[in-house]
Image (cartoon, grey):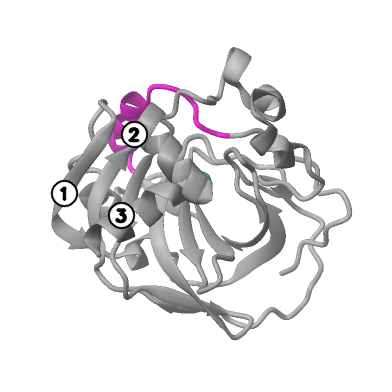
């Protein structure tokens, strides 16, 4: 059961589902990247399975020109279920045991993992941030919902410190000394923007509910440096056109 869960989590790492899980085990991130021949503008040509990367409803975006939709609160129910940290060659990810979830549109989405991008992937009103966390959830049918939190440089974040305490420059997985809760990544105010988008990594699958928290959190300069040094490159996909999509708040 443990193994099955972690396979699912690994699949979500590359945010690529079950085919991705196999890829991750075999090749460790060598199939695409953030620069040059493997970079975001080449993703569609790397593999037929990545054709969605050229879609009209891609992420990340610049969250601006929003429509006031009086969005209902997202119901967060997070526990200390983050038990292992993975360097998958693209990001640093914490895998979450069953038991943490959110409710959106009356549907329960279970938290599978969270991971980070530096600089941020989504922009807010034209602004890029030094760091963004993606909290990746799936409902029982495999539909995904990602809660995004942007970070400024400032006070250190204790959850980030715990999550990154065992991150390594080498690809692989380490157990965390103490389980972490994604609740420590959320701003006090749960106000959010919402749009429909995609995975920000190949295969760029669409139909992902994006919940972008309005208020930024902070990490310290040392935390940011540690992450950037460990990953070794900027792991943000450039912003994509919003096209016909409304962005709600
Ligand atoms: Zn991400």
Residue lying furthest left in this view? Answer: 177
Q: Residue placed at 26% from the left, 46% from the top? A: 85
- Ranked by sequence position, the earlier of labels 1 and 2 is 1
Q: Residue placed at 65% from the left, 49% from the top? A: 205
**Crowding at label 3, few (<14), some or many (≥20) Cα neighbours within 10 Å?**
some
Left or right: where 122 falls relative to 56: left
Q: CA distance from mark 1 to mark 2?
A: 18 Å
**In front of the other: label 3 or label 1?**
3
Above or below for 47 versus 11: above
Q: Residue placed at 56% from the left, 71% from the top? A: 141
**In front of the other: label 1 or label 2?**
1
Residue at the spot of label 2: 227
Residue lying furthest right in this view? Answer: 244
Labels 1 & 2 near each other (Cβ < 8 A)? no
Residue at the spot of label 1: 175
What stretch of residues is rendered in magenta? 220-236
Q: Quadrant of residue 193?
A: bottom right
Residue at the spot of label 3: 6
Q: Quadrant of residue 8?
A: bottom left
- Ranked by sequence position, the earlier of labels 3 and 2 is 3
Residue 13 drawn in magenta: no
């Amino acid at each position: 059961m443990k193994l099955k869960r972690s396979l699912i989590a690994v699949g979500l790492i590359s945010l690529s589902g079950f085919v991705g899980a196999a890829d991750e085990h075999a090749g460790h991130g060598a199939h695409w990247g953030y620069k040059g021949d493997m970079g975001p503008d080449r993703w569609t040509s790397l593999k037929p399975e990545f054709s969605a990367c050229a879609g009209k409803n891609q992420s990340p975006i610049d969250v601006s020109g929003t429509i006031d939709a009086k969005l209902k609160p997202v119901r967060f129910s997070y526990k200390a279920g983050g038990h292992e940290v993975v360097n998958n060659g693209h990001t640093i990810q914490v895998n979450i045991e069953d038991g943490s979830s959110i409710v959106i549109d009356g549907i329960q989405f279970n938290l599978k993992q969270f991971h980070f991008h530096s600089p941020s992937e989504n922009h807010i009103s034209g602004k890029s941030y030094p760091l963004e966390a993606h909290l990746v959830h799936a409902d029982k049918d495999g539909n995904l919902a990602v809660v995004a939190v942007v970070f400024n440089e400032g006070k250190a974040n204790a959850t980030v410190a715990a999550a990154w305490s065992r991150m390594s420059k080498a690809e692989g997985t380490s157990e965390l000394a103490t389980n972490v809760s994604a609740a420590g990544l959320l701003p006090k105010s749960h106000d959010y923007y919402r749009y429909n988008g995609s995975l920000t990594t190949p295969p760029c699958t669409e139909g992902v509910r994006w919940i972008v928290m309005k208020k930024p959190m902070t990490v310290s300069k040392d935390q940011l440096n540690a992450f950037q040094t460990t990953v070794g490159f900027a792991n943000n996909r450039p912003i994509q056109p919003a096209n016909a999509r409304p962005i709600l708040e």
